[in-house]
């Protein structure tokens, strides 16, 4: 039975991750219903010709996710009734803060069920047991040194960045990076910043709330229009070159060179948001812009898309002339972030656990993107899907005359979470469309969601 249920590619690394994925899918689709008793780790390892450690790691991960329940003397069973009981008890608590509703097609979020709980628990416990007592004091506001060392190495190896540990500031997510950088720009006399059009609605709010006026700079099939940026006269510009949000285009080589030349000629600052660049499915990811122009680029990233937003872990690396201003404003912002989480993440990076998680997530995200594209072609045929095969979202353009805000509103009422493309534009105009997320939903859920969405899209004739 177990040999038939569990199909492993032994020529591919990550057997524990493969086993986790297979069992998780079998639980989700009902092939392993609640209450099913699983073999002991020793027995399953023998049946599948695996080391016992591989099976132990897989069981631990699924138990941490709440999908398996292990009890001394009772073995391991598929959970279900236990989780329902916990949720029922939680619902009875007074003044309970409601959870954010889980919406299908919501862009910008990963699958929280894929968070590597077992691996995180191990690195967290190792951190707690091995850290010196002095580490519990107020730390360096720029972040734990060990994490800054590991991040500099990781970003250089994976993203082609050129950063040294002293130039990395650990932030509470990318949001704090935007806030600190905006404050430093304002202190330096800047009042405006160029902003991709269309561009991230969320980042726009962060920058505007810190006193910067956003000047829209058009984006086309090659990325941001550098000639238009030059004409704007702004002293800084915000870009997402690896996978533009929301259009999904990659900044073309010629535009990259022109953007760097603009910064060097004018003294302008390029703010690079590398928000989901590890997730490219048709080829290796394009290296970050900071790697070719470290003296002109402020580089921002986080684990919110790769692990979970709840960790509140991000990083900011700025050119040397900006370091003092950024470090000072970071210190006044919070006196330093959560050191335990920073050191645990450093351990996850050093142990290779983060790389293993990204490999597994990349495979699953590719599968889900393919499922979404297939569903869109089936239920919304003829509509243009834009963006390269990357990231956690794509854009589908709607027929001319359709009100994408209205469609998005009807979708929200139906339990769906797409964002209207028009909301991403500062100056208005442009074709209507929807920004659809796929990372948080299984292929079957995506099929159901798109079928529902197809009934909500107003035709051009109805819109007139």
Image (cartoon, grey):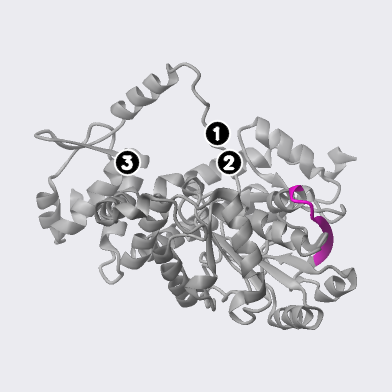
Count neighbours of disc 1 (C-alpha within 10 A) and say few if under 14, some if 14 to 19, many if 20 or more.
Answer: few
Q: Magenta part mainly helix, strand or loop?
A: strand
Relative to residue 268, is residue 106 depicted above or below? Answer: above
Pick the residue in front: 137 or 403.
137
Mark identifier at residue 67 = none
Q: Quarter-wise, where is residue 134 in the image?
A: bottom left
Spatial CA distance of label 2 from label 1 is 18 Å
Query: Mark 3 sits on what residue?
Result: 27
Count neighbours of disc 3 (C-alpha within 10 A) and say few if under 14, some if 14 to 19, many if 20 or more.
Answer: some
Residue at left offset 76%, top offset 83%: 261
Q: Is residue 184 magenta?
A: no
Q: Which of the two marks, 2 or 1, is nearer to us in this view?
A: 1
Query: Mark 1 sits on what residue?
Result: 100
Pick the residue in front: 314 or 34.
314
Residue at left offset 77%, top offset 47%: 423
Q: Which residues are magenta?
A: 209-218
Q: Helix or strand or loop: what does disc 2 sit on?
A: helix
* Spot occupied by residue 27 in the image (x, y as percentages of width and height): 32, 41
Q: Quarter-wise, where is residue 391 in the image?
A: bottom right
Q: Helix or strand or loop: what does disc 1 sit on?
A: loop
Residue at left offset 30%, top offset 43%: 64
Q: Which of the two marks, 3 or 1, is nearer to us in this view?
A: 1
State yes or no: discs 2 and 1 in contact (Cβ < 8 Å).
no
First in sequence: mark 2 vs mark 1: 1
Residue 108 visible in this rendered orientation of the protein:
no
Spatial CA distance of label 2 from label 3 is 21 Å
Query: Mark 2 sits on what residue?
Result: 449
First in sequence: mark 3 vs mark 1: 3
Q: Helix or strand or loop: what does disc 3 sit on?
A: helix
Residue 300 visible in this rendered orientation of the protein:
yes
């Amino acid at each position: 039975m177990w040999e038939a249920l569990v199909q492993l590619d032994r020529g591919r690394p990550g057997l524990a991750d493969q086993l986790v994925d297979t069992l998780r899918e079998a639980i989700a689709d009902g092939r392993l219903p609640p209450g099913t008793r699983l073999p002991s780790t020793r027995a399953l390892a023998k049946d599948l010709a695996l080391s016992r450690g591989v099976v132990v790691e897989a069981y631990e991960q699924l138990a941490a996710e709440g999908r398996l329940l292990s009890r001394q003397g009772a073995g391991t069973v598929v959970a279900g009734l236990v989780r329902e009981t916990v949720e029922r008890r939680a619902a009875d608590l007074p003044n309970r803060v409601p959870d954010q509703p889980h919406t299908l097609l919501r862009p910008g979020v990963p699958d929280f069920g894929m968070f590597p709980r077992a691996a995180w628990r191990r690195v967290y416990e190792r951190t707690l047991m091995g850290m010196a007592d002095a580490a519990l004091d107020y730390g360096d506001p720029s972040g734990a040194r060990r994490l800054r060392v590991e991040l500099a190495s990781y970003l250089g190896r994976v993203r082609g960045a050129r950063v040294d540990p002293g130039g990395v500031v650990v932030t509470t997510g990318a949001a704090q990076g935007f806030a600190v950088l905006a404050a430093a720009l304002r202190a330096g006399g800047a009042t405006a910043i160029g902003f991709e059009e269309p561009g991230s609605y969320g980042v726009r709010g962060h920058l505007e709330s810190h006193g910067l006026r956003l000047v829209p700079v058009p984006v086309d099939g090659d990325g941001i229009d550098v000639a238009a940026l030059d004409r704007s006269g702004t002293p800084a510009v915000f870009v997402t070159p690896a996978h533009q949000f929301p259009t999904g285009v990659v900044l073309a080589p010629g535009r990259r060179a022109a953007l760097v030349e603009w910064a060097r000629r004018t003294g302008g600052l390029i703010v690079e948001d590398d928000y989901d660049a590890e997730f490219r499915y048709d080829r290796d990811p394009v290296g970050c812009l900071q790697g070719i122009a470290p003296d002109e680029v402020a580089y921002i990233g986080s684990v919110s898309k790769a692990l979970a937003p709840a960790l509140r872990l991000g990083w900011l690396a700025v050119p040397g002339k900006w370091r003092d201003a950024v470090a000072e404003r970071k210190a006044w912002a919070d006196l330093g972030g959560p050191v335990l989480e920073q050191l645990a993440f450093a351990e996850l990076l050093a142990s290779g656990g983060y790389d293993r998680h990204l490999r597994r997530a990349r495979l699953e995200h590719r599968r889900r993107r393919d499922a979404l594209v297939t569903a869109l072609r089936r239920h919304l045929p003829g509509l243009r899907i834009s963006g390269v095969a990357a990231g956690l979202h794509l854009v589908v353009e709607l027929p001319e005359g359709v009100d994408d805000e209205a469609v998005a509103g009807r979708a929200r009422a139906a339990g769906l979470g797409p964002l209207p493309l028009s909301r991403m534009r500062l100056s208005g105009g442009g074709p209507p469309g929807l920004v659809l997320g796929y990372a948080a939903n299984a292929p079957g859920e995506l099929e159901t969601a798109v079928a529902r969405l197809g009934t909500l899209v107003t035709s051009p004739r109805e819109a007139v």
